[in-house]
Image (spheres, rainbow, N blue to C red):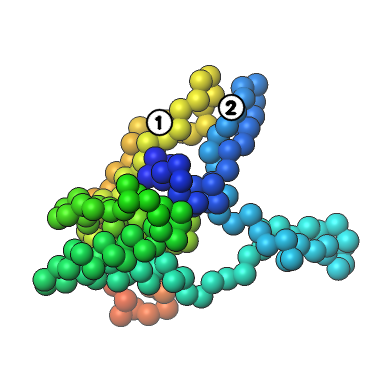
């Protein structure tokens, strides 16, 4: 995912940070970690009762993101009956310019399927970690697939067993939807769970 960001994109250094990770006796330096919500310093305070509770990662919620509106507009231009690619590129490039990508070489100039993929990538770059990804994949009919992981010499940070790093689920996979809670099924006999959630994967 980090490869989706260019060096001049403000979002890469704002959303991610590099740290040292110690794994038992092994250590990995310069590991990219997600750091989009480091917390607003004005919300850090000591707990009133115990005096030793430090709240961190407290942020002021943004009810509406202007960037999301630009992405919705670009996607709408591309998915309507008569696609308007030029208008879609106008929205995408305006968003990118606001993120430090103002050079002509940074502009999206693609067309057709490549432009649609550029639009999808912009959704990832801008809204990573904000709860949009699953809805986007369902809306586009795209599979859920784990992206390539970071590689570190002599340090295993992620589970590499089958079905973990290489996980992929098609858009019609039952795991794209949440199971109906058991208490809801028990409380209302008219609700029927049509999926067999007791299967083993």
> Which label was assigned to residue 109?
none
- Kindly tell me whether residue 10 is visible in this rendering: yes
- Which residue is at 72% across, 61% downward? 41
Q: Earlier in the sequence, mark 1 or mark 2?
A: 2
- Residue 149 vs 138, above or below: the answer is above
- Residue 104 vs 166, above or below: the answer is below
Q: Position of residue 201 (x, y in %)?
A: 32, 44
Q: Quadrant of residue 150?
A: top left
Q: Quadrant of residue 71?
A: bottom left
Residue 110 shown left or right of residue 168 in the figure: left
- Quick one: 64 or 138, which is closer to the camera? 64
Q: Which residue is mark 1?
A: 161
Q: Position of residue 113 (x, y in %)?
A: 16, 53
Whether label 1 touches label 2, CB < 8 Å: no
Label 1's element? loop
Is disc 1 surrounded by few (<14), some (14 to 19) or many (20+) residues within 10 Å? few
- Which residue is at 55% across, 34% downward? 31
Q: Position of residue 76 (x, y in %)?
A: 24, 71
Q: Which residue is mark 2?
A: 28
- Residue 185 vs 92, above or below: the answer is below
Residue 71 shown left or right of residue 78 in the figure: right
- Which residue is at 33% across, 36% downward? 166
CA distance for labels 1 and 2: 20 Å
- Quick one: 150 or 9, which is closer to the camera? 9
- Quick one: 95 or 71, which is closer to the camera? 95
Residue 54 shown left or right of residue 95 in the figure: right
Position of the N terminus by quadrant: top left
Residue 160 shown left or right of residue 108 in the figure: right
């Amino acid at each position: 995912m980090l490869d989706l960001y260019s060096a001049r994109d403000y979002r890469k250094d704002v959303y991610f940070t590099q740290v040292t990770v110690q794994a038992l006796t092994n250590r990995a330096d310069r590991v990219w970690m997600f750091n989009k919500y480091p917390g607003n310093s004005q919300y850090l305070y000591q707990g009133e009762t115990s005096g030793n509770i430090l709240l961190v990662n407290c942020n002021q919620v943004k009810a509406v993101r202007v960037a999301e509106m630009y992405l919705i507009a670009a996607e709408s231009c591309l998915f309507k009956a008569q696609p308007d690619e030029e208008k879609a590129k106008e929205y995408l490039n305006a968003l990118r310019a606001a993120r430090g990508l103002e050079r002509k070489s940074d502009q999206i100039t693609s067309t057709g399927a490549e432009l649609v993929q550029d639009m999808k990538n912009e959704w990832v770059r801008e809204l990573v970690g904000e709860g949009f990804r699953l809805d986007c994949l369902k809306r586009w009919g795209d599979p859920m697939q784990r992206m390539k992981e970071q590689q570190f010499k002599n340090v295993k940070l992620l589970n590499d067993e089958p079905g973990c790093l290489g996980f992929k689920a098609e858009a019609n996979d039952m795991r794209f939807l949440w199971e109906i809670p058991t208490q809801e099924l028990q409380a209302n006999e008219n609700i029927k769970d049509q999926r067999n959630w007791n299967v083993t994967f």
